[in-house]
């Protein structure tokens, strides 16, 4: 038992730690998100200076922000759009990076990008001129997915686009009680109900701060964690999660025309 003067602090600390380990149960089997510098085949090859975008694929982790900033630094800290395809991941990792994206006025595109060249793997070898920065060429092949914690991350982008067949999914976040930190959080004065309430209360605040319709948070709360509420681009647009069309951002210096033309 903690002394009285520490009990309130312990409870708050327990809640904060638990928030770090909130995840979609389904997403835990996926690979951690990677950030790869990319360009279209039609773009010139000259390494990192010629990268046109950053491809973000996989589960959002606590280290995702470091991966994003490392890729951005390799590209000369340029304002590159992010092509996003993710099944979800950890809430704190998603919301932290979302706030950074908002500060940097990032553009995000929900799409599945497949590499057309690889470094040291099967498939067409990458142009040697792209060795600096390990830039790969990609094509946008489908809409991809943005589910669970991914919409929380996407909300941070200022300009949010998607392929017409992209899919979005939400469900109520759950506490990962099997993790070491989750157990520590519960031992520091939290309990399932109180920790879950804290998480549920924070979600509408996050979306409101990002200018997203509060109905999106309601859909999270209404869907049990073990299921997924999937919806198409039209609904994502109605909720404000997708807020731009290629024609509306044409001419933006960070968005090459060929990349916008690939969003169909």
Image: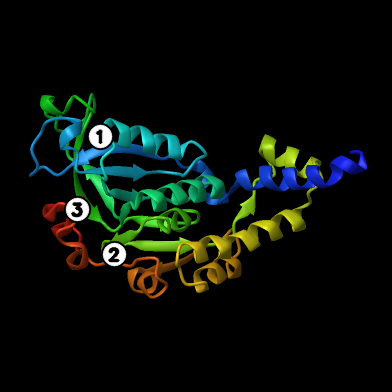
Q: Dot 2, how many residues are within 10 Å of its Cα: few (below 14), some (14-19), or many (20+)?
A: some
Residue, x 50% and y 42% (percent of image)? 29
Sequence-first tag of 1 and 3 = 1
- The Cα–Cα distance between marks 1 and 2, rounded to whole angstroms, is 29 Å
Q: Is residue 135 left or right of residue 161?
A: left
Q: Is residue 237 left or right of residue 249?
A: right
Report helix, strand or loop for mark 1: loop
- The Cα–Cα distance between marks 1 and 3, rounded to whole angstroms, is 15 Å
The residue singled out by tag 3 in the image is 255
Picture quadrant where residue 3 is located: top right
x, y (%) of residue 27? 50, 48
- Which is more foreground, mark 2 or mark 3? 3
Residue 127 against residue 142 in the figure, above or below: above
Residue, x 45% and y 39% (percent of image)? 64
x, y (%) of residue 145? 37, 56
Q: Dot 1, how many residues are within 10 Å of its Cα: few (below 14), some (14-19), or many (20+)?
A: many
Report helix, strand or loop for mark 3: loop
The residue singled out by tag 2 in the image is 165
């Amino acid at each position: 038992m903690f002394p009285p003067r520490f009990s309130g602090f312990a409870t708050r600390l327990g809640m904060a730690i638990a928030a770090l380990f909130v995840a979609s149960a389904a997403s835990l089997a996926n690979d951690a998100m990677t950030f790869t510098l990319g360009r279209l085949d039609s773009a010139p090859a000259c390494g990192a200076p010629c990268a046109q975008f950053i491809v973000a694929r996989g589960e959002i982790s606590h280290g995702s922000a470091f991966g994003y900033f490392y890729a951005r630094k390799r590209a000369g800290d340029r304002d590159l759009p992010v092509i996003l395809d993710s099944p979800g991941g950890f809430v704190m990792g998603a919301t932290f990076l979302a706030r950074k994206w908002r500060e940097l006025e990032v553009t995000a595109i929900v799409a599945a990008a497949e590499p057309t060249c690889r470094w040291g793997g099967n498939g067409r070898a990458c142009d040697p001129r792209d060795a600096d920065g390990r830039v790969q060429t990609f094509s946008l092949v489908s809409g991809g997915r943005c589910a669970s914690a991914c919409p929380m991350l996407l909300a941070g982008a200022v300009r949010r686009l998607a392929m017409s067949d992209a899919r979005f999914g939400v469900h109520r976040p759950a506490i990962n009680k099997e993790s070491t930190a989750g157990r520590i959080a519960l031992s520091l004065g939290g309990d399932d109900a109180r920790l879950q309430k804290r998480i549920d209360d924070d979600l509408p605040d996050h979306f409101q701060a990002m200018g997203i319709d509060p109905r999106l948070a309601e859909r999270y709360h209404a869907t049990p964690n073990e299921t997924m509420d999937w919806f198409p681009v039209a609904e994502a647009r109605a909720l404000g999660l997708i807020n731009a069309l290629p024609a509306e951002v044409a001419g933006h210096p960070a968005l090459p025309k060929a990349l916008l033309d690939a969003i169909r």
